[in-house]
Amino acid sequence: MLPLPHKILFFVFALAAAAFGLWGFYRLYRRVARGAAASEARFEAPVARVLSALRVTLTQERTFRRRTAISILHAFIFYGFVYYLLVNVVDGLEGYLNFHIDSAANPLFALYNVLADVLSFLVLVGVLSLVVRRLFLPSKRDFRFTEKTLLHPLLKANYILRDSLIVSAFITFHVGSRVIGNAAKVMQEGGDAFQPFSTFMGHLLYGGLGAQALQGWRLFGYWGALGSVLAFLAYFPYTKHIHIFMAPLNYALKRPVGSGVLPPMKGLAEAMEAEEPKLGVEKLEDLEWPRLLDAYSCIQCNRCQDVCPANATGKALSPAALEINKRMELNVIAAHPSPFTLRPAPFESGASTAHPLLEFAINEESVWACTTCGACMQVCPVQDEQMLDIIDIRRHQVMVAGDFPPQLQTAFRGMERASNPWGISRDKRLEWAEGLRVPTIDENPEPDVVYWVGCAASYDPGAQKVARAFVQLLDKAGVNYAVLGKKEACTGDSARRSGNEFLYQTLAQENVETLNAVAPKLIVATCPHCMNAIGNEYRQLGGDYRTIHHTEYLETLVAAGKLPLAQLTDHVTYHDPCYLGRHNGVFDAPRTLITKMAGEVLELERSRENSFCCGAGGAQFWKEEEEGRERVSDNRFREIQARLDGAKVASDAFEQTGKVLAVGCPFCKAMINSSPEKQKRDDIVVKDVAELLLESVQRADGTYAQPTGPVPDATPLQQPEVASAPNAQLPMNRTGDTPAADAPNPVVGETAADVINAQPGSPTQNADTQPEVQAAHPETTARKSWKPKATGDDVQSVPAAPPAPGADVAPTRKAWKPKPSDDVNPAAVAPQESALEPEASAPSDTPTARKAWSPGAKSGAAPVSPEAVAPTLPPARPAAEVPAVSGDSREAATDGLASATDRKKWVPGGAKATPAEATALPVRDVPTAELPQDATRTPPPSLESPPATGERKKWSPGRGSAPTASQSVSATAPEEPLHDSPAPAQSGSEVEGGSDTDSLVGPSTGARRKWTPKATTSPAPNVTPDAEPLRAARPTPVTEPITEHVHLDHVGENALEDGEAATHAPAGSGRKKWNPKK
């Protein structure tokens, strides 16, 4: 018991310290409350929330997800401090009341003393070990940020290290003082077997001391242990140690939905009509208050940075830096000149912050590097929501600032006009099913299963294989199913993840109305992104549907015995898609199927909840990847190939088996297939689980048809064409190869087994992969694999016939170069820009290639004299003269996709590709009558002159609207000289309103400045009108890759929207990108 003077002094000190501490906590509350209102319920079911928070806190289950050894040391400190809440209360009462805890008096007292003694020892071990690790054994993962990561000035000034040392010193002094005082007490009482550590320290420190000296050390221990806690209260709200209170609060106030569901934006339409719309997040106070609570909950452990795919590949993004920067700024704006100032800071009283988040919390490059994989949220020990901050910042950048990666603009336009980010006509949504009997909802209005195909499976050949395999499995199992067909629209997932919430809600509302009318019993999707949007996010808009992944449904069919399986000999590993596994918890269904087919799943080191992203999420598929050491897909594929190669040791028969990576997402399949690392490994095949299952079922029922063998590879100009997006590394389609009129249909005549089971022999023949382009590969062979009707896999290139006398012929096109200026004569630009660009085969009854990703491009070409057109390249007529394609003749389902061998290997640094020597294709004279009636391609809008009719043609994907007469140039005077000087180089951002030709050449993947790659300057030689026919007739170099990425910012940039005047810009200038800042 304390002497009376000590009692009085301690009581006064305790009151003063408690007052300052409570004032600090109140100010902290005021800062958190300055955040915007939460868009989701955070206080419903309070009892359940409290119980959940207690469970997570006391079990430390989130902490033990990673760094096991460090987590154990942290647990020592945590459990010690939890128990010290009781110990400090008991010690405080002992100072004022005449009682003490005697171990011999009561078993409960003995238990109390044992736990207090042991935990005191463990706390000291834990904190001292972590200090040694932090100062003398620095981990490569802790507080190491890339040079490109934006850091708060306080963070640069080693604030974290200083704060960590202060907290560690406090813990050591607090617990150490208690041990010193308790050791003196034990020595006064003659020792205690239930307090071994205190007894040991007593003999070590106080051997031979008298009773008065021991009493002095007891008083020191009392004041040191309890006084340090009271003194620390004033500093507590500003230190990282505040997480011991904020983390449990975060658990209790967690979101009621999973990480795959983004917060809703209510009243969006009204907000966008406001004079100064306030959408998304610009400043600290715009963040919802739970996000400000995240900043104070952050333990500053950098675990989220460890698992971030962008950070792991050298990008600027660091989720840890985002939360720490927020905390630093909150502390700065709350600071007063004197700690004794008893008034709130201006921010706490309602004043706005001076700086936007992009100036101190996260830079723009980091905002657009996020793949929304959710790994940071899944691994965070205190359940912070870093990804949601980034999404809210994107919303502001897209819908208010208009500042976003230009490649996304084309995906937005495609979703707006064609209801898919590819921008391909909605009428082509069922072309993937050609040759199969797939019932639509109109044909089967009461199905048991509605198969949601999705945009990828509708337009991307690699994903189309999955859809075809899945419907064949449904047929074999006798499932009553239907698809929506043309009624299906994009779910809007990419729009929402990229920040375009308005576009997402437009698309989602349309789908909700369609699905509500259909009233599906069950929706099955082969795309996890579609499954997540329909099953989880559409509830925010009134659509509540039971939605599952196709692997889950196939598992039930196999378990019911409806799909007999045969054993496969392949070694199979599995990649967990982020939106299937981490966001929706589907881990076992794919593995169950693979185990039944292949015997076992070769698990990757980073699997299940810890799976590593493929790099496509968060709308990354539609834009260029930010600059870093490597691609995210390369990082992932190296792990995959190491696992499959490691299986060689475990099997003597490995050489007779295949190496297969199984996936459950079309975007994962495209990204991994397109990885440059994948191009080096033609022995590893990437397949969806449904493709593997169909092969197993066909082997079981005897209908499997082994691919016969390789077929000669086509030259680069004859490669089959595929459609995808820039970050998938699938280049645009080559345009201009007119197929032979009698070319066989690549789908008709093939059996279902042929379609599904044909496997690529190497990545150079696989439509889903993109190898390095060589000068020529005439000897490269590949097994014939199924392509959609329009891929042109079996079509031979036919040289163009001479144009008919008097016919209007569009000029050939050259790879895109930046425009010199808006006042350049379009008539002069057109031949210069188009001289070397290969052209797509025209629509016909044979598989052809359509114009790539050009929704809204203007039609109508300036006539060119027949003498100026190369006889080896096909002519093209203005779109107004193109006859309607019959119902049996469809344009290429690939719509803008090029073959794997047409792309250039990605090289960091953006090295410019040098075309190899051109290899001329054989030329033969073909009568004009042999060409299909509708063999044409729509010329790019800014490289052509519109017809003189002055009428606008209704927009449709792939063929643009005809400009008005005010933009027209005479259609009868093509002899005007072409470019006489090279166009000056411009950056991608400077070339606003670029023509549709711009979209056909992608930027380098190397060093980039704020999303806008450097334009590749390729000056054209000075030529005279007499030399022009020779230049136009020059064949396209076969080794010149059309693109490695795609300039999506220019595709469809010049498209005239309905009702939009066509007289505001000269022909060829295009529309300027909307930017509210200007």
Image: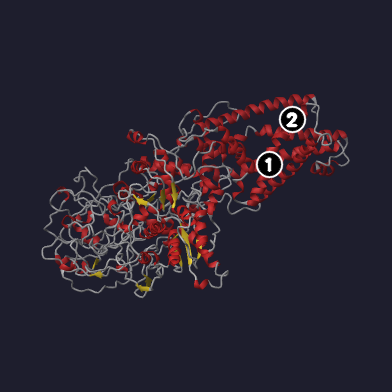
- Residue 649 horizontal/vertical position (percent): 57, 70
Is disc 2 placed on a helix, strand or loop? helix
| Quarter where residue 897 is shown | bottom left
Q: Camera-side residue: 832 or 1051?
A: 1051
Residue type at mark 1 is: Tyr
Badge 2, how many Cα within 10 Å: few under 14, some, many 20+? Answer: some
Residue type at mark 2 is: Gly
Q: Camera-side residue: 484 or 721?
A: 484
Q: Tell me the quadrant of the picture where the N terminus can be found.
A: top right
Horizontal side, residue 705 vs residue 957: left or right: right
- CB within 8 Å, label 1 to label 2: no
Residue 336 visible somewhere in the drawing: no
- Compared to residue 555, the image places residue 505 above or below, namely above
Horizontal side, residue 135 vs residue 224: left or right: left
Q: CA distance from mark 1 to mark 2?
A: 20 Å
Horizontal side, residue 533 vs residue 15: left or right: left
Is disc 1 placed on a helix, strand or loop? helix
Residue 127 visible somewhere in the drawing: yes
Q: Earlier in the sequence, mark 1 or mark 2?
A: 1
- Residue furthest bottom as drawn: 779
**Which residue is the site of mark 1?**
79
- Residue 1055 horizontal/vertical position (percent): 25, 49
- Residue 456 horizontal/vertical position (percent): 37, 54
- Compared to residue 486, the image places residue 544 above or below, namely above
| Quarter where residue 708 is shown | bottom left
Badge 1, how many Cα within 10 Å: few under 14, some, many 20+? Answer: some
- For the image, the number of numbered tags is 2
**Which residue is the site of mark 2?**
92
- Compared to residue 33, the image places residue 600 above or below, namely below
